[in-house]
Image (cartoon, rainbow, N blue to C red):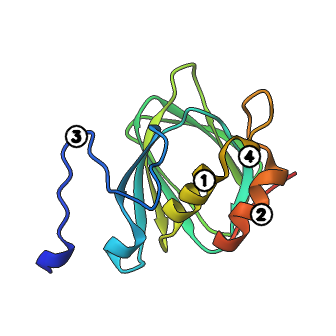
Amino acid sequence: MSHERFIKLLPGERRPGRVSLPPPFQLKARTEDTEGRLSLLEVTLARDIPRHTHHLADEMIYVLEGELGVHFDGEDLTVPAGSFILLPKGVPHALSRATDIPPRVLQISSPGGWECYLEDLTEAGPATHNPDGTFNPAELNPIAAPYGIQYEE
């Protein structure tokens, strides 16, 4: 193992990024930390994520706490704590809170790059949201396109 790539994060710590991500996103491994192989974030799902497709990366989620709602390939699933899901690239999916308590998950993208999209989204600010706080796919898609992500409008 290369000592130059060794990372140790204590509870609540996160990797620094180009911009500071909002509190629901705790960056644990950046794409450059893993030589492009993956990115890893601890995420509290504060808002439902509308139906979208990753065209370049597989998305893997391990549910740490709570229950995650997953709409995948026409099926609605409830994924409880301790469960793992693999969302292969190219298949539309959506994520939601299955209960009033937001689920906390580990989210892995392979190859990496997810954190770069989130940084761009953070820089874009509130324009990506509708007045009711939900995401606005028409505003998200231009930001998501360079990362091979497309939201359904």
Neighbor class of circle 1 (other Cα within 10 Å; few <14, some 14-19, many 20+) is some
Give me the residue at 37% from left, 39% from top: 82
Residue 64 visible: yes
Mark 4 or mark 1, which is nearer to you?
1
Above/below status of 87 relative to 25: below
- Secondary structure at numbered mark 4: helix
| Quadrant in which residue 37 is drawn | bottom left
In front of the other: 67 or 22: 22
For the residues labelled 1 and 2, say whether their Cβ atoms are less than 8 Å apart. Answer: no
What amino acid type should be assigned to the residue bearing mark 3? Pro
Please give the name of the residue rendered at 88% of the width and 51% of the height, measured from the top-left corner.
Answer: 153
Q: Which of marks 2 and 3 is nearer the N terminus?
A: 3
**Marks 4 and 3, how far apart at CA:** 30 Å
Residue under label 2: 142
Secondary element under disc 1, as helix, strand or loop, is helix
* Residue to which mark 3 is pinned: 11
Of the two numbered discs 1 and 2 on the same chain, state the one appearing first in sequence. Answer: 1
Residues marked 2 and 3 touching at CB (< 8 Å): no
Q: Is residue 34 left or right of residue 45?
A: left
Q: What residue type is labelled 2?
A: Pro
Say what secondary structure mark 2 lies in: helix
CA distance separating discs 4 and 2: 10 Å
Identify the residue shown where x is 58% and y is 50%: 122
